[in-house]
Image (spheres, rainbow, N blue to C red):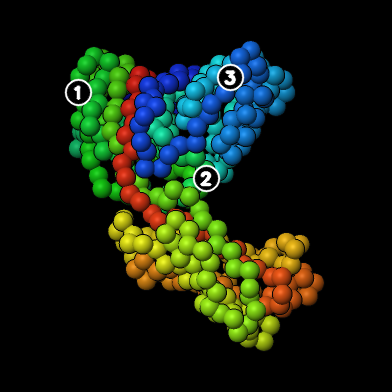
Amino acid sequence: MFRFLLSVALFVVVVQLPAQDDEEKFVISPRTVKMELAHSNLSKVTKEMTRQTGIAIRLPDGKAAEEPCDGIFNGKPFWFALEFTASQTGNRIVLHDSGRKIALEPRGKSYEVSSVHGPFRVAAREVVGRLQLDTGTTFHELHLDIHWEPRFPVFRLDSTPRITKATDDKGKILTVQSSGVRGQPTGAMHPATVRLGGLTRESKRIAKVEGNFTVAASEKMLAFTFDDLTKGKSPVTTPTKEKVAGTLKRVEKDEKSWEFEVELNYPAIGPKFESFESWTHENRLRLVSPEGAKSFTTEDFELLLQGSKVVGIYRFKEDDKRGLVNPASKGWKLIYEAPSTPVEFNVPFELKDIPLP
């Protein structure tokens, strides 16, 4: 009898280490790992990964950090190196805080199927078989987690990737329901679903799923520093970064509230964003006291998009107890973090040997 309304969470790690072309060019390049730590241990290898990439990795509790491990990589992407390290030590990659934090945890019975391309990684999370009684339609849903190195912002990606090839273990070509659904992720990961038709009771596994998804992202976050907040000296400009010009347009005080207006001018934005889509949700402004003694942020702000111009208006209330007094005096500065110019591109993936419920 065919299996419906069943799901299988993917357990027992089967790491597919993809062949990587060292000459391949990525729109957003991955952080890479280059080391020769033979006969080492998990702690030393992951610490060196973090040192080279700036990406923190939390290890399991107990003696797992001393697990024997070889760290020999000739400039491989971060995810590739971390997958290989996890497979050596009986661990799996686990994401926390919406992908912002990365950990290795004991493998247990987990079965991990993944694909790495540059700074992106796609992992199969669950397979669900369904039967729609009102239509008699049967299909399977393959649930994926798309995630990326948590150092750059992604503003939009496909919630239903485009599938170019899908087969079962008998070689049968599977049908795929396409969709134009896109989502705006929070953090450094986003769920995606692939609906497959054509699997039968003879099908034991999904042999292969190939496809791609479109991403709108920025390569990095930029930091614009305004060192002179003295009233009457606005506007203040900072050196252009990545072809983005930053200007502190004005500093004003209304009773005990200070208002700062910052303007960023980008070159022509490539991706076309809908009115309900935002590529400025990662923008952050910090007010820093003299000599960096204290740092202040605020939730009272407005962000205005005018073509390739971003205008941010931020309001701070004076607070003697916290030390926020007269930020327009000597020594105070603003640090405005904002993404580099957004770009849009396709990310391919290939998943193999996915078990069925």
Q: Which residue is mark 2?
A: 151
Give the crowd class for mark 2: few <14, some 14-19, many >=20 residues within 10 Å. some
- Of mark 3 and mark 1, the one earlier in the sequence is 3
Q: Is residue 230 visible?
A: yes
| Residue at 55 percent of width and 58 percent of height | 223
Q: Which residue type does callout 3 highlight?
A: Glu
Query: Where is residue 203 drawn, in percent x and y?
Result: 27, 17
Residue 178 relative to residue 288: left or right: left
Residue 173 tag number: 1
- Of mark 2 and mark 3, the one earlier in the sequence is 3
Residue 115 relative to residue 63: left or right: left
Tell me if label 1 and label 2 are in contact, CB under 8 Å: no
Q: Which residue type does callout 1 highlight?
A: Ile
Q: Is residue 201 above or below residue 98?
A: above
Structural distance between the alpha carbons of marks 1 and 2: 38 Å
| Residue at 63 percent of width and 69 percent of height | 227
| Residue at 47 percent of width and 62 percent of height | 240
Q: Nearer the viewer, residue 345 or 173?
A: 345
Q: Which residue is mark 3?
A: 36
Q: Can you tell which of label 1 and label 2 is closer to the viewer? A: 2
Q: Is residue 288 above or below residue 133?
A: below
Query: Where is residue 218 drawn, in percent x and y?
Result: 42, 51
Structural distance between the alpha carbons of marks 3 and 1: 43 Å
Structural distance between the alpha carbons of marks 2 and 3: 25 Å
Which element type, helix, strand or loop, lies under badge 1? loop
Q: Nearer the viewer, residue 109 or 94?
A: 94
Q: Is residue 136 above or below residue 215?
A: above
- Of mark 1 and mark 2, the one earlier in the sequence is 2
